[in-house]
Image: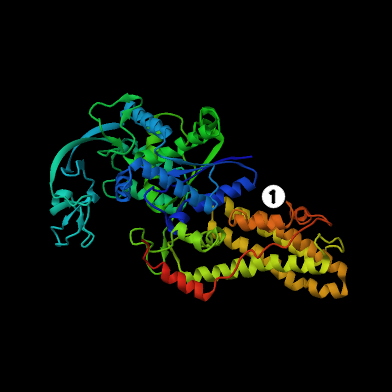
Amino acid sequence: MARILITSAIPYINGIKHLGNLVGSQLPADLFARYMRARGNEVMFICATDEHGTPAELAAAKAGKPVAEYCAEMHEVQADLARGFRLSFDHFGRSSSQRNHRLTQHFAGQLADHGLIREVSEKMIFSIDDNRFLPDRYIEGTCPNCGYDSARGDQCDNCTKQLDPTDLINPHSTISGSTNLEVRETKHLYLMQRALRDRLEAWIDSKADWPVLTTSIAKKWLNDGDGLQDRGITRDLHWGIPVMKGDQSWPGMEGKVFYVWFDAPIEYIAGTAEWADANGKQNADWERWWRTDKGAEDVTYYQFMGKDNVPFHTLSFPATILGSGEPWKLVDYLKSFNYLNYDGGQFSTSRGRGVFMDQALSILPSDYWRWWLLSHAPESADSEFTWENFQASVNKDLADVLGNFVSRVTKFAKSKLGEAVPEGGEFGPQETALIAELGARIRDYEGYMNAIEVRKAAAELRAIWVIGNEYLQAAAPWSAIKTDPARAEAMIRLSLNLIRVYAILSQPFIPDAAQAMMAAMGSDDWTWPSDVPEAIRALPAGHAFTVPENLFRKITDEERADWQQRFAGKRE
């Protein structure tokens, strides 16, 4: 039994995520976690809400709530949606937890002790009316290059020129609109990533099995332009983890907090500690997942994320861990994803364009979405959600192939042979051929799942469902029962057993439908079908079954047209 640690990029707290966010990290991580559990491995699957930084403060202000209260409420909203999509986290934590406070401060202290933190004096824009320093994106004004009147403090979206806030003409705060701004000096802490560059490059070079997308992004940040840069790890904000050197104060850093991108990945570790706390366990129980001196040397650690998060997880977070000088577990395999686009454009949280997680569940059960998203996961390139494709995939894959097989077998069996697995007849050449093909395809399916090739795994699973339909069509038990009832009984006995096998194989992709299939077969035996001849005989003659409700309904053209119009960009 292997020990598998899985983390997915933690979703930001300021609002409900869209389906592009879901398929880029949490959903494929859940697929892999479910599969690894199904194969009998010990799995720890951790996620959390990412709760610090200016956007959280602004979202709370917009909602008219204290930021701590807003984050607590949104954590519950996101946790509820995760349950709705059947994301099987062992723990869904919070980056604002006391565990993450202490651990982030600990790492900062360790880095300082190893000479990897330096103080830098910077000039920043201070809003007198807002009584705060303004990050670049919260300053707007007129671009000195093209005259665009909504240029941000870091870049003009109109002419793409890189800017400093002090370049802007007539700058104002986007928080309050105030023009009462001045330049002030402030000090910040920087993580000296450049000092760790050679160690980071050697570590990345050792990961020959990583996806090309992952390594290409990491190498770009290591080598392009001036190469890897030192990175600021503190901010002048009110909400966040106070800057401390371990459990000691940090002179000159009073009133500052750690930058959200420093503390957020540390929450993977802290979240596992939160899991231990929530389940009455000891520190040793979470440390065996993260400390190689306390049991984690036999753990294989997988991370899942969208490509925009790759630089932080291949460089900054590893720099924190390596620089600490402590025996923390580094990621073994980082699965990154491209972007999912929406119906000819992009998902847009700000414009409400696309389907968001709460909206999706209000339309259809989670399995419909899980299947489409995973079978179209943006692995090798960006992919696109269209309503036509979604309708076709649901109707053809789920309703016509899997749902149809389960319905035909159970309804025929009940009406002609009763509500128990029939005992007549023996398996013949057709059954032998099916068992052989099923065994070969299951091995291929396992190979794709082990390699986290999500789309190929989905295609192989669909092919496994097709085997059943092709067998049923060729064997034609509805004809055989008229001339050779025993032969028909053998066909149905195999087909009912095949439904149970489909439940086990399908569970990582469509867990609710898998549970319905298993319940209909009157079984709770989720043993992986490594031995196909044995698995296809697991339900003995006389074993009771029921006809399940229709597993999947078809999407009508009218529904598709309605949804396409409804989610074109009008979310309030």
Residue on which the image places disc 1: 526
- Residue at the top extreme? 248
Can the viewer see residue 294 in this picture? no
Instruction: List x then y, in percent, for residue 117.
Output: 29, 32
Q: Quadrant of the N terminus?
A: top right
Looking at the rendered structure, the secondary structure element under dot 1 is loop
Q: What residue is rendered at 13% in x and 57% in y?
A: 144
- Residue at the front extreme? 64
Instruction: List x then y, in percent, for residue 425.
Output: 87, 64
Can the viewer see residue 214 in this picture? yes
Where 557 falls versus 405 (above or below)?
below
Q: What residue is rendered at 41% in x and 59% in y?
A: 339
In which image quadrant can residue 230 be found? top left
Looking at numbered disc 1 in the image, what kind of residue is underneath it?
A: Trp
Q: How is the image coloured?
A: rainbow
Q: Is residue 248 left or right of residue 399?
A: left
Please name whichever residue, 495 or 220, is drawn nearer the observer in this view of the structure.
495
Q: What residue is rendered at 46% in x and 57% in y?
A: 358
Where 79 falls versus 233 (above or below)?
below
Please name whichever residue, 182 or 42, is drawn nearer the observer in this view of the structure.
182
